[in-house]
Image (cartoon, grey):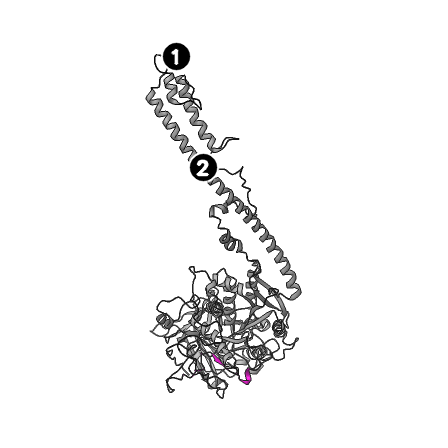
Amino acid sequence: MAERSQTAPEAGNDMGNDDAIGGNVSKYIVLPTGYCGQPKKGHLIFDACFESGNLGRVDHVSEFEYDLFIRPDTCNPRFRVWFNFTVENVKESQVRKIVDTFRAVLRVIFNIVNFSKTKSLYRDGMAPMVKSTSRPKWQRLPPKNVYYYRCPDHRKNYVMSFAFCFDREEDIYQFAYCYPYTYTRFQHYLDSLQKRNMDYFFREQLGQSVQQRQLDLLTITSPEDKSDLENSVMQKKIKIPKLSLNHVEEDGEVKDYGEEDLQLRHIKRPEGRKPSEVAHKSIEAVVARLEKQNGLSLGHNTCPEEVFVEASPGTEDMDSLEDAVVPRALYEELLRNYQQQQEEMRHLQQELERTRRQLVQQAKKLKEYGTLVSEMKELRDLNRRLQDVLLLRLGSDNLREGAERKVVFITGRVHPGETPSSFVCQGIIDFLVSQHPIARVLREYLVFKIAPMLNPDGVYLGNYRCSLMGFDLNRHWLDPSPWAHPTLHGVKQLIIQMYNDPKTSLEFYIDIHAHSTMMNGFMYGNIFEDEERFQRQAIFPKLLCQNAEDFSYLHRTPDSVPSLVWVMKIESSTSFNRDAVKAGTGRRFLGGLLDHTSYCYTLEVSFYSYIVSGTTAAVPYTEEAYMKLGRNVARTFLDYYRLNSMVEKVAIPMPRLRATEERSSGGEPPSCLRTWSEPEALGTSMTTGCEPASIGTVTSHGIWNVLALPYLLDSSPTPSVVHPT
């Protein structure tokens, strides 16, 4: 590493020392020490003046090394973690250079020197994200090119250095701490959902931030009139065959099939005649022609034998039969055939009459069905208009009148730099608005209220933890100010209003975050004096652990402890605490405000990776993996409320089972389709062949040392994973 120039801050910039950083660099050209003249190719240009950008200062160490300083959060110098900047104007020598005879590639080294956290996932293999104009998809740098260490040249702070090889001179390269998710992207996403005109999705503006950015509130639930009722319920009741559906016009009207107008398609009926008359007259015409040829007229009351007796040889009329051309035997055969055909025609006529009556009945049912369809469409339109009026008057409270509705309230991005929170939130929303059978059941049974971005100003400015005015909003739930914390104040007032509404049961509050030092997804919960309530609170995280392979319920390390007692490892595990420093969080405040039927969680997901149970390899998170976790969170409500029987047994893409669960279940279906064997009351002990043990005690740090909970823990310990320190 080249020796750092003591006058670097004075060469090419006048930003001064670390404490003087006050804004992002804007197309900042880094010049070598003592250089005079116009910038050349290879003098890198750094820029962070764009949405969610963050880079406060750049020092030139050499042509191939630069010290970078993160801009602190606005009005709060304590937090310096998030970075997001671009680099351009690279030259060929920085792209690829031959060194000695080994043809080594020389890379540019960037040192981020003022992280505010000493602990970081960079010690465990995490790497910055990078993309370029020619390759717009975000990728992680190879972990072997990333180093995290304590540096004596920067007040003995921890420094993250990464080496990068620029391979195209014309490209603009962008580096970020994690996958960015901007306020503008979020607005475009909500606009696209709103354009779909889904009657179970409603978007409203709950308030505005200090800089007048809107706080969006989403409501996802089924309306009272289901759009698929006419295709499922009505057909099952009336049992109309598929052919009958062809008579329903697109506008809902039904063709009138009366008794007189009903006809068979394969018979062309002459005007004013019935189908049976056509065939009957055609046969009589043939017989009449034969009779005419024989000079006879077969009356209705004349026997065929009598006719031939009267027409036998030797009689007076013998001369009149000289012109006959049909022998007697053939004529008798024709008569027999005629009688047989008449008998068959009578049977056919009876069969046609039965068919006609059945079709008339089907037409009457179809007419009644069409009337119901028209009425249902009119009622649905009326319901939509009434719903719009109620939403304007009651603030989008679309809870059904006269019935208590179960509400799940989800918030995200209260800390603006925790971008995985937005991807998880989008995964939840995408699943709930889909046509998946599980999503339909959840919309029917629950009301989802989602505020995906509580800190839009901080997101736009590129802060890591604070709002525009430097407040950590997740520490001000006790008494939020309507002017300093307007978004938090609006959400809190809405939750209190729903809590005081006797028709509303607020059962879940989940605040989604990202963690910078831990692996996997996990949850924080509250501690209650009531042991039964505590056990009930642990059910949802356990169910989520079964559905999501990247979620960790308990990360147990059985070494150095008794075999029957597993001490919870704080790293990457769900825990329940009452730390004083967490008193102002949404989870702690609402957990103390709401009644015993409500449960509040903080859902954390790693910035970097997760470790699948039974393995030791870290799997880096992607945008899709974050959204998959959100989908699994939504699916878990099906298990929690035991709504499996309401889902049709069809081919449904199910969440992937954890490796240990696949082996232990022996190929059984996943939990979201298994019938519940537990008792009706969620708070009672579940049938597992043993009674639940006691809960244990609270440590000095306020964390539960969970002992053995047979109905919550797996039958065998999960292999421990030791993270490097």
The magenta stretch spans residue 574: yes
Three-letter amino acid code at the position of disc 1: Asp
Q: Going from the N terminus, do you reach mark 2 or mark 1 first?
A: 1
Task: State whether the magenta stretch is mostly helix, strand or loop.
Answer: loop
Quarter that holds the N terminus? bottom left
Q: Position of residue 718 (x, y in %)?
A: 38, 78
Q: Residues within 10 Å of mark 1 (few under 14, many from 20)?
A: few
Give 680 or 454, whichever is nearer the viewer.
Answer: 680
The residue indicated by pointer 2 is 350
Q: How many marks?
A: 2
Q: Residues within 10 Å of mark 2 (few under 14, many from 20)?
A: few
> Toward which corner of the image does residue 708 lie, by quadrant?
bottom left
> Toward which corner of the image does residue 617 lie, by quadrant?
bottom left
Determine the CA span between mark 2 and mark 1. 42 Å
The residue indicated by pointer 1 is 317
Q: Which residues are magenta?
A: 566-583
Q: Position of residue 709 (x, y in %)?
A: 43, 80
| Image side of residue 615 versus residue 177, left or right | left
Would you say the residues marked 2 and 1 are in contact, meaning their CB atoms lie under 8 Å apart? no
- Residue most extreme to the bottom: 700
Q: Secondary structure at mark 1?
A: helix
